[in-house]
C-alpha cells in the first residue's frame, strides 16, 4: 500500500521517471509473490504424489490436496487480462524440480508414519516420474 501512495506522490510531483521505476519494482514484487505461491503449491502437489507412489495407495484427502494444489497453481500462473502465463512450461518444470526435495522431506515425515528418512524414501520413488506426473496434471486440467 505504501508503494501506491509513493507512486501517487511521484506522479503529482511530475517525477515520471521515478514513478516508472517504482512501477517496475512493484511489478517484480507481484511476480515474485506469484512464483512463491506456485512453489508452495508445487510442494503440496509433489508431497501427495510421492506418498501415493511410495505407499502404493491413495486417500480421499490426498486426492483432494492434489486437486486443490493443481487448481491453485493453474490459477496463480494465469495472467488475468492477457490469458498468458507467468511461468512457461520449462519454468514450471524447473519449479517442480526445485520443489521436489522440500516435498520429499515432508513426505518422509508423513509416509509410513515417518519411519524413513528423506534419502531412504527418495530411493523408493522415481523422481522423474513424479515430477512428470505433476507437470501433466497442471498442464492438462
Image: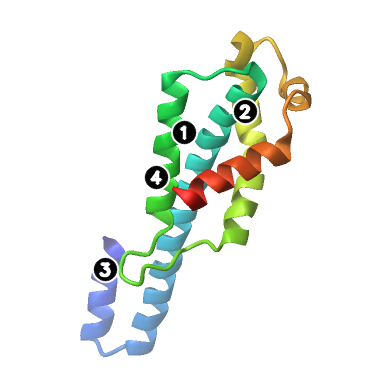
Where is the N terminus found, in terms of image quarters? bottom left
Residue 29 picture quarter: bottom left
C-alpha distance separating marks 4 and 3? 27 Å
Mark 1: secondary structure:
helix
User: Quick check: 6 above or below 108?
Assistant: below
Disc number lying in front (2 or 3)? 2
The tag earlier along the polypeptide, 4 or 3, is 3
Disc number lying in front (4 or 3)? 4
Mark 3: secondary structure:
helix
Q: Name the residue that disc number 3 marks.
A: 4
Tell me which residue sits at (71%, 14%) in the image.
116
User: Quick check: 47 above or below 24?
Assistant: above
Indicate how the structure is coloured in the image.
Answer: rainbow
The tag earlier along the polypeptide, 2 or 3, is 3
Mark 4: secondary structure:
helix
Q: Name the residue that disc number 1 marks.
A: 66
Disc number lying in front (4 or 1)? 1
Image position, residue 15 (x, y; %): 31, 88
Q: Name the residue that disc number 4 marks.
A: 72
Mark 2: secondary structure:
helix
Other residues around mark 1 within 10 Å, as few (<14) / some (14–19) / many (≥20): many
Q: Name the residue that disc number 2 marks.
A: 50
Image position, residue 41 (x, y; %): 47, 41
Tell me which residue sits at (60%, 41%) in the image.
133
Amino acid at each position: 500500500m505504501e508503494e501506491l501512495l509513493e507512486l501517487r506522490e511521484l506522479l503529482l510531483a511530475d517525477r515520471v521517471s521515478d514513478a516508472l521505476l517504482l512501477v517496475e519494482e512493484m511489478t517484480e514484487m507481484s511476480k515474485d509473490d506469484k512464483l512463491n505461491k506456485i512453489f508452495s503449491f508445487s510442494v503440496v502437489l509433489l508431497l501427495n504424489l510421492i506418498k501415493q507412489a511410495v505407499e502404493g495407495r491413495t486417500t480421499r484427502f490426498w486426492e483432494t490436496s492434489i486437486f486443490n494444489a493443481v487448481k491453485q497453481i493453474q490459477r496463480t500462473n494465469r495472467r488475468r487480462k492477457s490469458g498468458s502465463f507467468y511461468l512457461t512450461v520449462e519454468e514450471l518444470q524447473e519449479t517442480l524440480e526445485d520443489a521436489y526435495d522440500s516435498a520429499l522431506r515432508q513426505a518422509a515425515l508423513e509416509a509410513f508414519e515417518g519411519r524413513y528418512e528423506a534419502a531412504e524414501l527418495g530411493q523408493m520413488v522415481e523422481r522423474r516420474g513424479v515430477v512428470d506426473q505433476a507437470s501433466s496434471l497442471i498442464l492438462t486440467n
